[in-house]
């Protein structure tokens, strides 16, 4: 496991992520069932283009996402208070020196578990509370982060001010992770091919 200490959303962080698949976008490579995603080709071309251009392209951001970023520190503090666990912030983590893909967790806990925080709109948070399980939309990100780090556990925390938080300790799903690993390796090979084709055009 290779840690890159930089502030998330900083220029250095964006530069480090150029052209590399990241856990937050693993849903564009595989579905929650481990099958190839319909977004695969678009994401492949995006990363190839970023590599050649040498810059991270702008990603979609709405008011809810901006609000989530603003509330993240508050949610992290509450998580630590409730669980009595110390959360350390980190920029990017890679599985090895090859840095082919990585993750940017909202925190790691004693180098043995990670944390993913979401601060959704109130109706979504209530839905999460009532279901009481890891939302399907984040299966690839959470399990993918365990693939990257090698951890066996990942905490998921959904937070909305004034309501109880949802805190779930998610175990490593070995079957899904192997499916993800296979698709991710194929994706990285295809990415290298597309990048080489683009380089030949320059």
Image (spheres, rainbow, N blue to C red):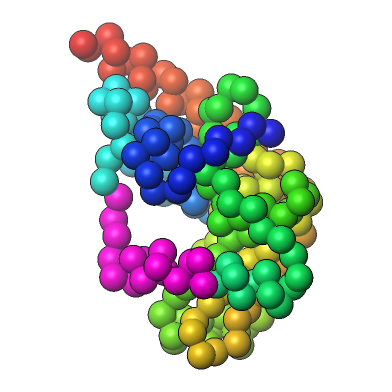
Residue at x 72%, y 55% (from the top left corner): 109
Q: Which residues are magenta?
A: 59-74
Q: Is residue 135 visible?
A: no
Residue at x 30%, y 26% (from the top left corner): 54
- Tell me the quarter of the picture where residue 121 sits: bottom left
| Residue placed most toward the observer, 83 or 94 | 83
Q: Is residue 145 left or right of residue 70?
A: right
* Total labels drawn: 0
Residue 199 point in image, percent of width and height: 29, 13
Residue at x 49%, y 84% (from the top left corner): 161
What secondary structure is the stretch in magenta mostly built from?
A: helix
Q: Is residue 89 visible?
A: yes
Residue 144 point in image, percent of width and height: 61, 47
The N terminus appears in which quarter of the rendering?
A: top right
Q: Is residue 71 magenta?
A: yes
Residue 22 point in image, percent of width and height: 50, 42
Q: Is residue 29 left or right of residue 200?
A: right
Residue sticking out furthest to the left:
202
Residue sticking out furthest to the bottom:
162
Above or below for 78 versus 47: below
Residue 107 point in image, percent of width and height: 61, 55
The C terminus appears in which quarter of the rendering?
A: top left
- Tell me the quarter of the picture where residue 164 sits: bottom right
Above or below for 27 versus 178: below
Q: Is residue 16 magenta?
A: no
| Residue placed most toward the observer, 160 or 60 | 160
């Amino acid at each position: 496991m290779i840690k890159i200490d930089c502030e998330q959303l900083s220029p250095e962080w964006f530069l480090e992520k150029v052209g590399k698949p990241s856990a937050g976008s693993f849903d564009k490579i595989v579905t929650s069932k481990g099958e190839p995603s319909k977004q695969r080709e678009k994401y492949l071309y995006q990363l190839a283009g970023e590599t050649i251009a040498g810059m991270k392209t702008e990603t979609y951001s709405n008011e809810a996402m901006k609000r989530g970023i603003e509330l993240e520190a508050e949610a992290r503090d509450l998580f630590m208070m409730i669980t009595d666990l110390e959360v350390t912030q980190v920029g990017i983590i890679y599985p090895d020196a090859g840095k082919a893909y990585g993750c940017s967790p909202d925190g790691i806990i004693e180098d043995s578990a990670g944390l993913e925080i979401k601060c959704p709109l109130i109706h979504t948070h209530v839905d999460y509370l009532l279901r009481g399980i890891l939302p399907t939309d984040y299966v690839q990100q959470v399990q993918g982060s365990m693939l990257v780090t090698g951890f066996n556990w990942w905490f998921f925390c959904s937070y909305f001010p004034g309501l109880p938080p949802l805190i779930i300790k998610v175990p490593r799903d070995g079957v899904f992770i192997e499916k993800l690993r296979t698709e991710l390796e194929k994706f990285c090979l295809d990415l290298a091919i597309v990048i080489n084709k683009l380089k030949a055009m320059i």
